Image (cartoon, grey):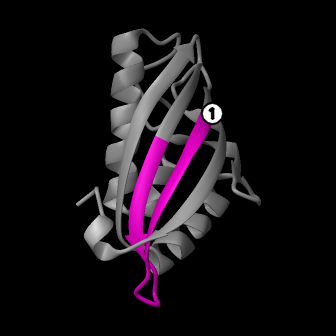
């Protein structure tokens, strides 16, 4: 089962929504190993200006991310899908190690292999400094 991550493409509305919720739940766990299992061994990412290749780099990236992004909370929303691809909108909030709160907004383009593992993830992200009282995700 580790080589498969149902639901598998081609996606329906129901299975695409399920896939997005699974991704949201995994990322909110803040467990880099758990998150990495949803990606192919040779996955390709673009996250802002950083290029990440393979599960080992995913784990290293997420470990660094969540060491610096405290109280992380994420919400994802499906924007569209076709066959083995999805477009997802997201926002997340976190507090940095200097106690500043942030809200990050963005879009992701996902491509899955036939086993339901994500082989490509391209994220465009913008950050906005916020006051703790302005948080929406708790």
Q: Give the overall secondary structure of the magenta segment.
A: strand
Q: Quadrant of residue 83?
A: top right
60 or 49: nearer the viewer? 49
Residue at image position (52%, 10%) is 10
**Up-down: is 111 above or below 34?**
above
Q: Is 100 situated left or right of 64 in this image?
A: left
Q: Is 35 situated left or right of 54 in this image?
A: left
Residue at image position (45%, 59%) is 33
Classify mark 1: residues with Cα within 10 Å, few (<14), some (14-19) or many (20+).
Answer: some
Secondary element at image label 1: strand
The quarter of the rendered structure image containing the N terminus is top left
Q: Position of residue 43 (x, y in %)?
A: 68, 43
Q: Position of residue 50 (x, y in %)?
A: 74, 61
Residue at image position (47%, 79%) is 67
The quarter of the rendered structure image containing the C terminus is bottom left
Residues in magenta, as a range: 90-109
Q: Position of residue 116 (x, y in %)?
A: 51, 26
Residue 3 drawn in magenta: no
Residue 104 drawn in magenta: yes
**Up-down: is 56 above or below 3?**
below
71 or 45: nearer the viewer? 71
Residue placed furthest toward the bottom: 98
84 or 39: nearer the viewer? 84
Q: Position of residue 85 (x, y in %)?
A: 60, 21
Q: Which residue is mark 1?
A: 109
Q: Is 93 situated left or right of 44 in this image?
A: left
**Up-down: is 34 above or below 17?**
below
């Amino acid at each position: 089962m580790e080589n498969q991550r149902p639901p598998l493409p081609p996606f329906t509305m129901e299975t695409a929504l399920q896939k997005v919720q699974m991704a949201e739940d995994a990322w909110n766990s803040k467990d880099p190993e758990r998150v990495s299992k949803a990606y192919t061994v040779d996955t390709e990412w673009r996250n802002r200006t950083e290029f990440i290749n393979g599960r080992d780099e995913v784990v290293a990236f997420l470990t660094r991310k969540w060491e610096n992004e405290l109280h992380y909370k994420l919400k994802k929303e499906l924007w569209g899908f076709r066959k083995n691809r999805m477009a997802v909108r997201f926002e997340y909030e976190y507090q940095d190690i200097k106690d500043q709160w942030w809200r990050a907004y963005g879009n992701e383009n996902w491509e899955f292999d036939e086993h339901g593992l994500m082989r490509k993830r391209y994220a465009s992200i913008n950050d906005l400094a916020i006051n703790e009282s302005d948080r929406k995700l708790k």
